[in-house]
Image (cartoon, grey):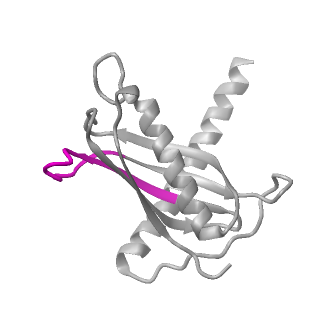
Amino acid sequence: MAEQQRDITLRFLAEPGDVNFGGKVHGGAVMKWVDLAAYACSAGWSGKYCITAYAGGIRFVAPIHVGNLVEVSAKVIYTGTSSMHIALDVQASDPKELNKTLTTHCIVIMVAVDANGKPTKIPEWIPETEEDIKLRDSAIKLMNMRKEIGEEMEMHVKMLR
C-alpha cells in the first residue's frame, strides 16, 4: 500500500426516496450514508476490507430536506491493532446557497479483516496536532466508557435470565 488516506468526504443530493412520512430524510438513510463514509475512510486508511463493529453516539441535530446537498465527512481519530475509530459529521445545505448546517454526528468503529473475515493488522495513526491529540484522547475516553456500559448491560442480561 502506497499511502494512507485519513479522511474522506462523500457528497450527493438527498433524493425523494430518502424521505420519511414527515417529508424529511429518515434516520435510516443517514445511518447508511454514515456507514458508507466510515467504510471508505477505514479502507482508505488500512488498505483492507473493513466491517462495522460499532456505531454510537449518533446525534440527529437538524433535518435534511429532499434536494439538499449532503456532505458526509469521515476522519480516523484513533487506531488499535485492527480497529479504527472514525469521527463522522453530516452537513446539508441548499445547493444554490451552500450554507452548510450540521445535521448529524457520531463515532463508528471499523475493523479491518482478512479474506477469512478475521481481524488483521492495520497501520497505526499517530496524532500530530493538538486538535488530533484531543480527538484521540476523546476516542480513548469513549472506548473506556463503552466498556463500562457493556459490563453494566451484561449484568442486566444475567439478571433477566
Please provide percent x and percent y for residue 130: 36, 79
State the extent of the magenta-drawn residues as a range.
86-104
Q: Position of residue 86 (x, y in %)?
A: 51, 58
Q: Quadrant of the C terminus?
A: top right
Which residue is drawn at the image coordinates 58% and 61% (left, top)? 42
Quick one: 49 or 54, which is closer to the camera?
A: 49
Q: Position of residue 147 (x, y in %)?
A: 61, 48
Front residue of 48/104: it is: 48
> Hey, which quadrant is residue 43 in on the image?
bottom right
Residue 161 in view of the camera: yes
In the displayed image of the protein, which residue is found farthest to the left? Answer: 97
Residue 88 in magenta stretch: yes
At x 45% / y 57%, what residue is drawn?
87
* Residue 46 picture location, percent across and down: 64, 68
Main SS class of the magenta portion in the image: strand
Q: How many marks?
A: 0
